[in-house]
Amino acid sequence: MFRSIKGIYYFTPSNILMKRSRKQNFWKHFQTQKAAILEIREIIDVHPFNMPFESELISDLIFERHYFCSKHKLRPSRFRKIKSYSCYSFEGDFSNNTLDPPIEWHAVSWTKCLKKEQTDWDRMIRAMRDRCEPVKTAYKLAHPTCEACKAAPAVEVHHAAPSFIDLTKSIRVDVEDLDIESCLSDWNWFHKKDFALPEGHKITKLFDAAHEDCRLESLCKKCHNKTKKKK
Ligand SMILES: [Zn+2]
């Protein structure tokens, strides 16, 4: 901003800062996500399987951007890659963090830390999808034929009205940020990787009630694809 004092214009430091930060880096010194992926892949590639190694950069990445570790200030000190069916699984050593019960090696995804950050509400929505899976499975068993074309076998159960996303939006209106925080507070990623809606919580109750009123529809692949095009 220019400030005018008795007609004299001063160039304030905030203005200079604004100019400098116009092009923000993706993370640390990396201008893009791709550049970060390439450099981290290079660090990992040189280490043999099962051999622990240290990397300040990857420790920082987990500490700053991992959805659970960043919240709980956890910083793995070493890493190792374990040969697996799909290339390798990546593990961090958490033994230097005072955890109760203590955790040593635990799988941790560095690639997820470089993806677009999910909000806590995104996590709620994913848990809502998981929660309605058994209901959808039961519905499909009861309605094995596509309810749209009435011919092909049903492969998918669709939230006909309201749509799933509208249903989650209607719940969000009745939920405070503090409710989301409390809903996540007891979840321990070390014990249960995927967050599930806790029984008895306000958000869980709201979801169950709203989902009960939702009209489901069994659809074949072709008819289900048509609902996607409409969106
Ligand atoms: Zn059909």
Image (tube, helix red, strand yellow):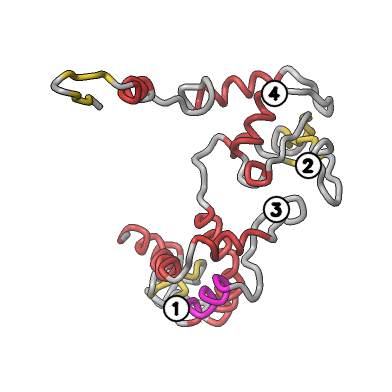
Q: Secondary structure at mark 4?
A: helix
Find residue 193 and name its label: 3
Residue furthest to the left: 7
Alpha carbon distance from label 4 to label 3: 25 Å
Residue type at numbered disc 4: Glu
Q: Main secondary structure of the magenta part?
A: helix
The answer to whether mark 3 and mark 1 are in CB contact below 8 A is: no
Q: Nearer the viewer, residue 110 or 72?
A: 72
The residue labelled by disc 2 is 106
Q: Position of residue 211 (x, y in %)?
A: 49, 76
Disc 2 or disc 4, which is closer to the eye? 4
The residue labelled by disc 1 is 214
Residue type at numbered disc 3: Lys
Find residue 39 and name its label: none
Range of residues picked out in magenta? 202-211
Q: Nearer the viewer, residue 52 or 17?
A: 17
Q: Secondary structure at mark 1?
A: loop
The residue labelled by disc 4 is 56
Ligand 1 within 8 Å of the CB at mark 1: no
The residue positioned 76% from the left and 20% from the top of the image is 47
Alpha carbon distance from label 3 to label 1: 28 Å
Residue type at numbered disc 1: Cys
Instruction: Examine the structure image and report whether residue 210 is included in the region drawn in magenta.
Output: yes
Residue type at numbered disc 2: His
Characterize the local packing of mark 3: few (<14), some (14-19) or many (20 or more) Cα atoms within 10 angstroms. few
Alpha carbon distance from label 2 to label 4: 18 Å
Q: Secondary structure at mark 3?
A: loop
Q: Position of residue 186 (x, y in %)?
A: 69, 61
